[in-house]
Amino acid sequence: MRDRVFGTENEYGALIIENSSGKETCRPVKKPTDTLHISREKFSRLGLISNSVQSSVWLHNGGLIYVDCGTHPEYASPECRRAIDLVRFNKAGEELICRAFPQCKIFKDNCAPPIDLDYTEVVVDGLVSYGCHESYLVFGIEDFNTEGFIGSLAPFLASRQIIDGSGFVDDGGNVHLSQRAKFIYTLAGSNTLNSRSIINLRKEDLTGTRTDLRRLHLIVGDANLMETAIFLKVGSTQLVLSMIEDGYAPRFDLCVNWPMFLREMSRNAYGKATVVVFPNGDRFSALDIQWIYCQAARKYLSFTDFESEESEHEAKIVCRMWEDAIDALWSNDMNWLVGRLDHATLRYLFMVEEKRAGAHLSVDRKKMISQNYRKVNKGENMSKLLAKKLGHTRLLTDAQIADALVNPPKNTRAALRARFLRALSVAQKKHPSISGAVGWSAVVFGKNTANINDPLCFIDPGHGFNGILEELGKINSGELTHKPQMTHNDFGYPLEV
Amino acid sequence: MPKREKRSLPKDGKKGEHAPSPSAQGKEFQLPEDEIGDIVDDAVKGTEQELASNKQTNAE
């Protein structure tokens, strides 16, 4: 089992806070007049705001915050090598997004902002879906559009929402497992805005000339608040990808309509009732399918080699926790599920409220609870308060998450990106006219571009990168005088060097 | 096609041969229902006030 890198991109719903005559009100972002801007003043210590594009900022933790389509904030985590790191950077993203957009109320949400609660005069059609996209580095598989790859991965992803579903209240007050499921209509394809797929085939590798590495970009998952849900979502997926790479993954027939199974299962409480029926009469529920993958992973981990003890340790923890989650779902063990899986936590909140009220909750009240659950602003953060009360469910400490606000993962190329950003920040303090540019697979300073194509490389990427850092070091120590002059770099906009 | 393992086969909607739930394996924990209810109530109250204020401002 090889170490891989992975990351998430979380799209957030935002409401603009307005103050008029001493009263605070909220309204959704309107296109195109309300284009969001990152707070330069509050954010300069956490990252590099591009001089040409005020709506994006490369963070000192190696990640990126930007405004997507002018309407919603988005946070891309840095590349991580461990699932627990991704949980850390994902949670740090909630804090960073709020700091970047202090003028907004922010929701970690797959669906449109809470327009149906009279927040707005803006009509948003029902097809708006804010997602949590995942990216995984995949080794040695050039084509994802094959029966083998899809037959092994799609059934796993279609049933994974019993773990990563974040809960959704429809207009009839019914509670679904997943927010995203109702937007998934095809098995495999490259469209990310409509006709979304279980397996996204878009080719955007971000690994430069490395043709042996491919990036798998998944858009099928929900945005999670609970640490365990994020950990299991990413951890189990990377185990399944390792099994696929090594030819050990379970493989299902593709004669079944997997997108339909995914959508129908989402409407089913705990993934038990909806079954997929194969021509030979075999019947599988979502829990059956997850159990098959989980047990295959357990066997796989008993014989595969690992790159380090740390990798082995985490893979085994993922597997054990995955089993626990399936067991807990079978037995409806709320003591285990609440605080760990989002959809179960949300259901529990409804249950508690119904018990208190002594009556069924109205649709609006359910939606209000659901939206509050996803609000991530400081001081109004229900999921954080719940996590505090349910401390035994947490995987991380607040200090570990706080560290991820400013420090990158140490074992991926994000560490190199962060080194460059820090050196550049110091240089900019001395010489405000100095600029540089950074991307996922390259950094630019002056006329020099250095590639960081290998996402797993974190020590010595070569002369180009080292040369740039050396030059910045000399400027910072006063050994080299900075002379501003205009040029163009590979990113296509003017920079001063 | 993969085979289902016995452990994953509940019979008649019952737990069947599935393992005991994680909580039943010595990880006993009682959810603090009242405290969780208070958190939810406070949050919802805040939103209700916000919505009322929004409606009033829009009406004005």
Image (cartoon, rainbow, N blue to C red):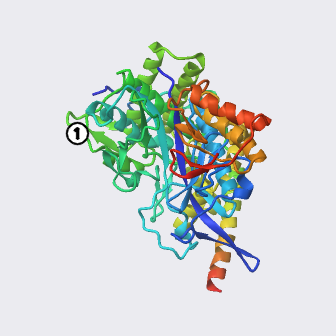
Q: Measured along the vertical axis of the image, is residue A323 above or below residue A425?
A: above
Residue at 39 percent across and 54 percent down: it is A183
Q: Is residue A147 left or right of residue A235?
A: left
Q: Is residue A218 visible?
A: yes
Q: Secondary structure at mark 1?
A: loop
x then y, percent, for residue A493: 54, 52
x then y, percent, for residue A374: 60, 54
Q: Quadrant of residue B3?
A: top left
Q: Measured along the vertical axis of the image, is residue A485 above or below residue B27?
A: below
Q: Nearer the viewer, residue A172 or A147?
A: A147
Residue lying farthest to the left in this orientation:
A279
The residue that disc 1 covers is A255
Q: Mark 1, residues whose alpha carbon is within 10 Å: few (<14), some, or many (≥20)?
A: few
Residue at 43 percent across and 18 percent down: it is A299
Q: Nearer the viewer, residue A125 or A491?
A: A491
Residue at 68 percent across and 34 percent down: it is A471
Q: Is residue A391 visible?
A: no
x then y, percent, for residue A389: 72, 45
